[in-house]
Amino acid sequence: ANQKGGVGKTTTTINLGAALVETGRKVLLVDFDPQGSLSVGLGINPHTLNQSVYNLLLSREYSFDEVVLSSAIDGMDILPANIDLSAAEVQLVSEVARELTLKRVLDRVRDRYDFILIDCAPSLGLLTVNALTASDKVLIPLECEFFALRGVAMLTDTIAKVQDRLNADLELLGIVATMFDSRTLHSREVLARVLEAFGETVFHTVIRRTVKFPETTVAGEPITTYASASQAADSYRMLAREVLARCHAG
Ligand code: ADP
Ligand code: MG
């Protein structure tokens, strides 16, 4: 989660997911952004979907198995989304236990997967609160850009409120620095400030800026298959190892 757009949430969800699959884990990716970028990034056209995560949230007539899709990556399933999901933000407001809606959907299938990764929308609205309520851990991507830290207090405040009121089990898994450009002093300075502010919470793995990531979106596949031998792919494999270590330690 990060209410800022363009910080690498979707890229991290897809590629961390794919890297976890390479270690033999079974992974479900949940597209929880009405933009449907995660779905697009895995080669799914959101406009042509007959059903999506929206239907699971708001109707009892659909089963998980009717909505879930298997991706081209063996062991990785996807719960797709499209613009319909933006209506859920409004419609959920009048539901009983509106913050628990996604949790109810996912609790039924969580024993089928080793990891369920939820790609949040760039907002702190009801959809993101649903995602935080359904989760054991939250991972925050932060871009190595000037205003990266702006808004993080609001995000951690939302996380604290969800911990207090809805999901006492929620933990901050870590912060991952993205879009790092080692050639610029600026990027190095921002990274230093992030480390200063968050210390050990920050993953050792830093995701560098490379055009390979936008390319994967066009290709509709993760970096781990699109450019398997690249440094970019390896960085998400390293992140996956760190995530596994933190999950097992916790
Ligand atoms: P968010 O989901 O937070 O809005 P995205 O993952 O969609 O962010 O990334 C925003 C844009 O930046 C996308 O076009 C994506 O391809 C690109 N991008 C993501 N990570 C990187 C990176 N490490 N280097 C270069 N471009 C990236
Ligand atoms: Mg996104």
Image: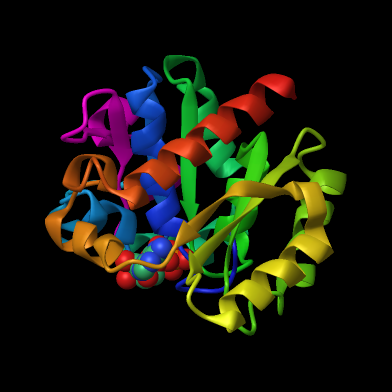
Residue 69, by quadrant, is: top left
Does 39 sit left or right of 180 as displayed?
left
Residue at 48% from the left image edge and 72% from the top image edge = 181
Quarter of the image where the C terminus is located: top right
Give 210 or 134, whichever is nearer the viewer.
210
Q: Is residue 134 left or right of residue 11?
A: right
- 146 over 37 or under it: above or below: below
How many marks on residues?
Answer: 0
For image coordinates 36% across by 45% down, the residue present is: 15
Instruction: Examine the rendering and report whether any part of residue 32 can be seen.
Output: no
Q: The magenta stretch spans which residues?
A: 54-82
Judge from the rendering whether residue 22 lies leftward or rightward of residue 100; answer left or right. left
Task: Name which quarter of the figure residue 17 lies in.
Answer: top left
Question: In this rendering, is residue 218 above or below 172?
Answer: below
Taking 185 as reference, is 86 above or below it? above
Q: Position of residue 172 (x, y in %)?
A: 73, 45
Q: Position of residue 155 (x, y in %)?
A: 72, 65
Please identify the quarter of the rendering in which residue 171 is found: top right
Q: Residue at (52%, 80%) from the top-left corner?
A: 184
* Rendered residue at 82%/65% (across/down): 197
Q: Position of residue 174 (x, y in %)?
A: 68, 47
The coloring applied to the image is: rainbow
On whether residue 58 falls in the magenta region, the answer is: yes
